Amino acid sequence: MSTVTPTPAPATAEALPVVSRRTQIWRGIRDSAPIFFVLALLLIAIGLLNPRGFDAAYFLTIVKRAAPLAMLAAGELFVIVAGEFDLSVGSIVTVVVVGSAVLTHGDPNLTWLVIAGLIAFGVVVGIVNGGLTAIVGVPSFIVTLGMLLILDGGVALWTSGAPRGSLPVNLRMFGRDSLQGVPIVGQVPYAVFVVLICGAIAFILLHRTNFGRRVFAVGGNSRAAALAGVSVPRTKIVAFVLSALLAVISGILLAGFGGLSNRAGAGMEFGAISAVVLGGAVLGGGKGSVITAIAGAFTLEALFTVLNLVGLPVEVRSTVQGAIIIAAVAYASYRLRKG
């Protein structure tokens, strides 16, 4: 008489391991702790190398210098989490800085009209980048590299290699001026408030909304996301639009802090990618955090400040950024293999 072996019942949701809220919080702390540890060490080094390094006002100055890169990194994160790249953000920054001067000629009455036009320009660039990537199927690296060349060439043609005009004072205030009379620190740069507000909005969008969950799903497995009913093209296009919009904000901050230059955003796209991967995002998509990406931008600025304080040349920055990208990606790959 044959014996029939009963077929095991399929696993149910109740049989699957459930990750508790406490475990999720611990994993988040564990994954983000390295960047904050490195940032703390760099700030201590700055304090030891500079007599004013431990002053709150000096710390806020570092935050003000890092603000444009922090906004750029927050925008780049949306695209990277979605599994793509955006190399055009540095050129968008340049267009914003040069365009603000050329279009306003220093007239503060035109500032808000020009800012509205630049925001519309950012939306168009994001739609073009996202559409060619997600709908036409051109790799985002190629699309945004091409956009970078188009925008840089357009700025050079527009200004004949020498930007003209001037930046209005009410536009420069966002990156240059401060709120006065603040207790303890005396003044707080407006750029700090911009980072806090835009960072909070980016955090909510990516980590607290259905759109953010779709971005993570698309970056983790776009085919599975599509089968689950997620519009992959729409999600990627919106991610590119957000990246471009935050690049516009970055350009406005940089215009105030650094002034007029037809090379204002040159190389900033690599700084943004460095900050994102330093903050723990995985190139290839599916993982990342707005808070740690912004912390990555602050860490880079703190690192460059240390390099300046010890007398190393500015050209070392490119070498350092390249080493950071390689090391961060290698560490992320190692951590993924270990589970």
Image (cartoon, rainbow, N blue to C red):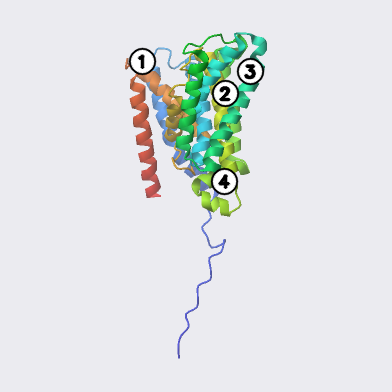
Residue at mark 1 to residue at mark 2: CA–CA distance = 29 Å
What is the spatial separation of the Cα atoms under label 3 and label 4, in whole angstroms?
A: 33 Å
Compare marks 2 and 3 and give the one earlier in the sequence: 3
Which is nearer the N-term, disc 1 or disc 2? 2
- The single residue placed furthest to the bottom in the displayed view is 1
Secondary structure of the residue carrying tag 2 is helix
Pick whichever, 303 or 163, lies toward us.
Answer: 163
For the point 42% across and 28% down, the residue is: 270
Q: Is residue 235 left or right of residue 91?
A: right
Is there a contact, CB below 8 Å, between mark 2 and mark 4? no
Sequence-earlier tag: 4 or 1: 4
Q: Amino acid at mark 1?
A: Leu
Judged from the image, the secondary structure of the residue bearing numbered disc 1 is helix
* Residue at mark 2 to residue at mark 3: CA–CA distance: 13 Å
- The residue wearing badge 3 is 114
The residue that disc 1 covers is 309
Mark 4 Cα-neighbour bin, 10 Å: few <14, some 14–19, many ≥20: many
Amino acid type of the residue that numbered disc 3 sits on in the rendered structure: Val
- Left or right side of 299 for 166: right
**Cα–Cα gap, marks 1 and 3:** 38 Å
Q: CA distance from mark 4 to mark 1?
A: 46 Å
User: Closer to the camera, 174 or 225?
Assistant: 225
- The numbered mark at residue 232 is 4
Asked if the residues shown at circle 2 and circle 3 are in contact, with their CB atoms under 8 angstroms apart, the answer is no
- Which amino acid, mark 4? Val
Q: Residue at x 45, y 42 (%)?
A: 284
